[in-house]
Image: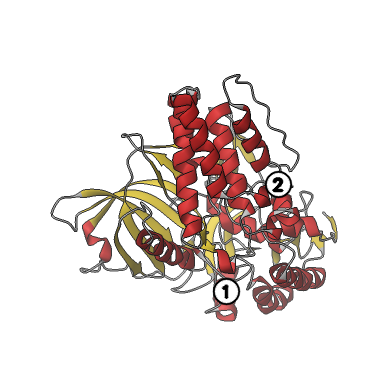
Amino acid sequence: MKAVDQKSKSDLISAGFNENSTLSTAESLEFRWKNLCEKYLPLLSENQIWRFNRERKPQDAEQGWKLHVSATILTAGTVLEKVASFLQKEDAYFKAPALLAYLKRINSGIYYDYSQIGKFITVYPQNNKQAVYFAERLHQLTFQIPAPAIPYDQRFKPESCVYYRYGAFRENKIKQPDGTFVFAMRDPDGNLVPDLRDSAEPYPAWVVNPFPEKKSKSAVADSPFKKIRIIRALSQRGKGGVYQGIDFSDAEPRLCLIKEGRKNGEVSWDGRDGYWRVRHEESVIKKLGECGLDMPQIYNSFQSEENYYLITEFIAGENLHGFLRKCERLLTLPIGLKYAIRITEIMLKIHSAGWLWRDCKPENLIVTPDGNVRVIDFEGACPIANADPLLWGTLTTNSPRLYEKFFSKSAMTPDMYALGAVIYLLFEGELPAADGNFIPKFSRADIPAEIKELISKLLDLRETRNCKASEVLDKLQKAFRTQAA
């Protein structure tokens, strides 16, 4: 390990915010975090993701009960201040992320691993007695501070920020039969066995749990999930899961989509979490539906424990990527124009209703069995008149530099750029590289010159901000009529 690192502006931009007040808030938090790290976590890991309070000692345990203290990017500084002095006094070995930007990625559940969500501070007690003592003190010091739940760890007490799991303290690995490597710990005979961080059991059968026994929750008779059966998880991340299920609340059982918004899940720099996002999406769906858009039908919504759930119709069909794969990504020009027109009509209706979608991408465009196109996912939508300063979704997610340089200057630009990227996908079978320097290359001779010019303009960030959905639609319709003549 080595001493202190330098925080860079690019690290902040890559975490998902721009140059205005949100960036100032984040920079302020990162500055405070850097000072706390210099005081309590002076050592930087070789991979530069983690900082430690001290060097590992030869007598430090190789495995045992790991304690995790959870926190959001907004509460991290407060949590470290509350617990660090106690841990240092006890000569405990512990670590935390080198940047809050890294904690943001950890809590998303997509950059590292879903099982890592919430693992802000990791403490390595030397024995069972110390583990229980540390857990109790850490719980007292952090009680009622907002924090995300850690997926597979055992919560120390109800509403606690402290979790525990038995596992290795050193990064031993063993090779699996399929050739992959997994973390390992030693069994009672000294053999290396898998240390599975995503197991529902927080400790192996041969370990005695020293922590206070918890009372199991009794089933609630009037649970809102009583009339819903979950079939499968479609996605899981920090802000919540998305599930396919069956809704039995109607006379006829019907397929449904269950969207979960987790309290304190994937908190953004402005304080919005998964719970807020799903409630916001419910509101957007209702408002856009009232404006005549073909939105997913809402069956129900409710709060269960700390999380919020939105139950909507399950839209049959395939997303645009899946649809194009089945077509071997070769659409005839008239069919490609037909889908481009339909998607542009949707974008125009969203904008005419006074909203920005901000998440136009193939995964959110569902081609139904009858050839229609329907849209999903409106967590990041915002009013045009009050555009959200935070980067969200769309095809720009992998290139925050574009947002910093271009998209923050015009609220409409992300939607129009994304529309151009989807139209390009329809005709060329690939998405443009979102690096700010993409020049469309057209391999098809049948694409009209005016359509090539239109796509090129949408994907030219010097021109995108001047594009309007109504003008794009007009040019697509004219090209379609010409082809049909």
Is 412 placed above or below 36 here? above
The answer to which image quadrant residue 65 occupies is bottom right
On residue 158, the disc is none
Question: Which residue is at 75% across, 73% downward?
Answer: 28
Q: SS of the residue at dot 2?
A: loop
Colour pattern of the rendering: secondary structure
Is 452 placed above or below 24 here? above
Residue 417 horizontal/vertical position (percent): 62, 46
- Residue 268 visible in image: yes
Q: At label 2, which amino acid type do we have?
A: Glu
Residue 103 horizontal/vertical position (percent): 65, 60
Q: Is residue 484 left or right of residue 432?
A: left
User: Circle 2: is it few (<14), some (14-19), or many (20+) Cα within 10 Å?
Assistant: few
Residue that mark 1 sits on:
133
Q: SS of the residue at dot 1?
A: helix
Of the two numbered discs 1 and 2 in the rendering, the one whose residue sits closer to the viewer: 2
Please state which of residues 101 and 322 is positioned toward the viewer in this rendering: 322
- Residue 325 visible in image: no
Q: At label 1, which amino acid type do we have?
A: Tyr
Residue that mark 2 sits on:
463
Q: Quadrant of the N terminus?
A: bottom right
Residue 457 horizontal/vertical position (percent): 67, 40
Please state which of residues 248 and 192 is positioned toward the viewer in this rendering: 248
Q: Quadrant of the C terminus?
A: top left
User: Circle 1: is it few (<14), some (14-19), or many (20+) Cα within 10 Å?
Assistant: few
Please state which of residues 6 and 466 is positioned toward the viewer in this rendering: 466
Q: Is residue 7 left or right of residue 18?
A: right
Residue 55 horizontal/vertical position (percent): 79, 59
N-terminal-most mark, 1 or 2: 1
